[in-house]
Amino acid sequence: MIGIGRAGTTRARAFDLHPLCQVVALADTDPENLALGKKRFNCAGYSTWAAMLANERIDIALPVLPVQPNADAVVASARAGVKAVFCEKPLTAKLADADRMVNECASRGIPLVCGSVVSSHPDYQKSYAMATSGEIGEIVRINLYEANGQMGTHGLSHARKFAGKPDVDFVIGWCSGDANSDYEGDYGDGKQGYGWLGGYIRFKNGIECFSGYRPKSGLPWRGIEVIGTRGMIFNQNNSSLGLRLFKAPAGVTPKAFSDLQEVKGAFSERTEREVTYDAEGWRQIGDVMIHTVQEMMDNLEHGKPIGAATGDYMRYALEMTIGLWESAQRGHAPVKFPIADRSLAAYPERSRWQYKKDVFGRDRYMAELGMQKKD
C-alpha cells in the first residue's frame, strides 16, 4: 500500500478482505498516517515507496495518493516487478505522464486499474454491453449532463464506453471559467480556474455526444442518456447506481418516448447506502470496490478480462478533458484526436492534486481517517 491515508485505508481493507490477498507492507511519507496504518494492518511500514519496493516481495501495488505523485509511484511499482497495480483517480494531469503510466505497465503485461468508480460496477458493465450489442437499436446520440470534473473520470468515460470504446475524431469545447487557466479550480492564489467543461464529442464510429452543464443554477440533472433507435438507457447521476432501461415493444417502431416501455429489474435500484461497521470496527466496503478486487483476482488467477476502469480508459478520459479545454482556449475551434502535444496538462481541483491534510487541515483529515475504523 502506497499512501495509507483516508482513501488508501479503504482500498487496503478491500483487498485485505479477499481470501487471496493480505496487506503485507505500507509506505507513507506522513509518519502519523503510517503509524496508524501499521497498527491497523499489523504489517511493515516504510517512509518511502522506494524502500518498500526494494525490501518487500509485492504482488499487487496500490498507490492511492494525491494525483501529483501518482505517475511516479505507478511507474516505480511496475519496474519493481509487481503483478498488478491499482491506483486512484484521476490518473494524472499531463498526457505524457498518462502515457508513461499506461505504457510502463502494458509493456510488462501488468494490469493497471484506476479508481473506485461506478463504471466498474457490474450494472454499468452490463449496460455498456447492452448498448453496443444492439439491445436498444443503433445508438443515435449520447447526452451527457456533467461538468466533467476529475479529468472526465465519470461522465466522459461513461460516454465513450456506451459508444463502444471508439477513438475520438474531434471535440469542440467550452468552459465556465478562464479558458487560459490549466487548473480546474482555484488553488488558493485567487486565480480563476477553467471551471466546468462542456462541448461536442464526435467519435470515429459516427456516434455523437453532447455534453452540457448549468453553471448559474447548478446541476439538478447530471446524468447520461444513451439514445438508440429502439430504446434508451439513462441514469440521473454519473457517479451512482440507478440505471434505467426503456425499450420499444416487439414490432413497434418508436417515434416518441411514449412508445417505449421501462424494463423493470434490468439494473439495481439506486439507494442511499447507510454507513455501517463490521464486528472488527471496520467501515463496510462498497460494492464497487469489492467487485473491482474480485475482477483483479480473476484476472491474475484465471486470465479473465478486467471490466473495471483501467488506466487506459482513464488516460482517454483525460485526453477528452484536455481536448475540450484546449478547444475552449482556441475560441471553440475543433481539436482533432489523438492530441499531438503530449506535454499538455489539465490539473484537477486542489484537494485531489495536493495532499488533503494540507488542504483541509489536520483535525478534519484525521477525523475522516478515524471514520474508516473504530479503533
Image: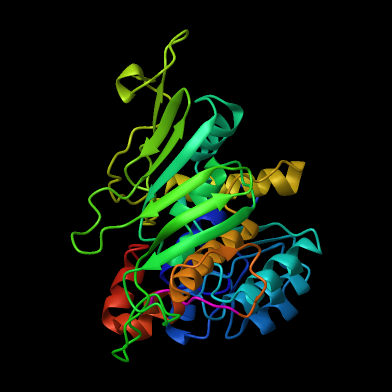
Q: Residue furthest top?
A: 251
Going 53% across and 41% down the picture, which residue do you hit? 162
Residue extent of the magenta highlight: 344-349
Magenta segment: does it hold 348?
A: yes
The quarter of the picture where residue 338 lies is: bottom right
Q: How many marks?
A: 0
Placement of the N terminus among the 4 image quadrants: bottom right
Say how the picture is coloured. Answer: rainbow
Going 60% across and 54% down the picture, which residue do you hit? 168
Residue 323 position (above or below residue 199): below
Going 50% across and 72% down the picture, which residue do you hit? 326
Q: Residue furthest left?
A: 217
Q: Can you give x and y, in whole percent of width and height, for residue 263 in the image?
A: 39, 20
Q: Can you give x and y, in whole percent of width and height, for residue 174 in the image?
A: 39, 66
Q: Is residue 367 visible?
A: yes
Residue 359 position (above or below residue 271): below
Viewer-proximal residue among 375 and 343: 343
Instruction: Determine whether, in the image, residue 362 is placed left or right of residue 181.
Output: left
Placement of the C terminus among the 4 image quadrants: bottom left
Q: Can you give x and y, in whole percent of width and height, for residue 38 in the image?
A: 51, 74
Q: Can you give x and y, in whole percent of width and height, for residue 153 in the image?
A: 48, 59
Viewer-proximal residue among 176 and 107: 176
Viewer-proximal residue among 75 and 173: 173
The quarter of the picture where residue 365 lies is: bottom left
Magenta segment: does it hold 178?
A: no
Q: Is residue 18 visible?
A: no
Residue 255 position (above or below residue 23): above
Going 18% across and 59% down the picture, which residue do you hit? 217
Residue 79 position (above or below residue 215): below
SS assignment for the magenta stretch, majority: loop
Q: Residue furthest right?
A: 108
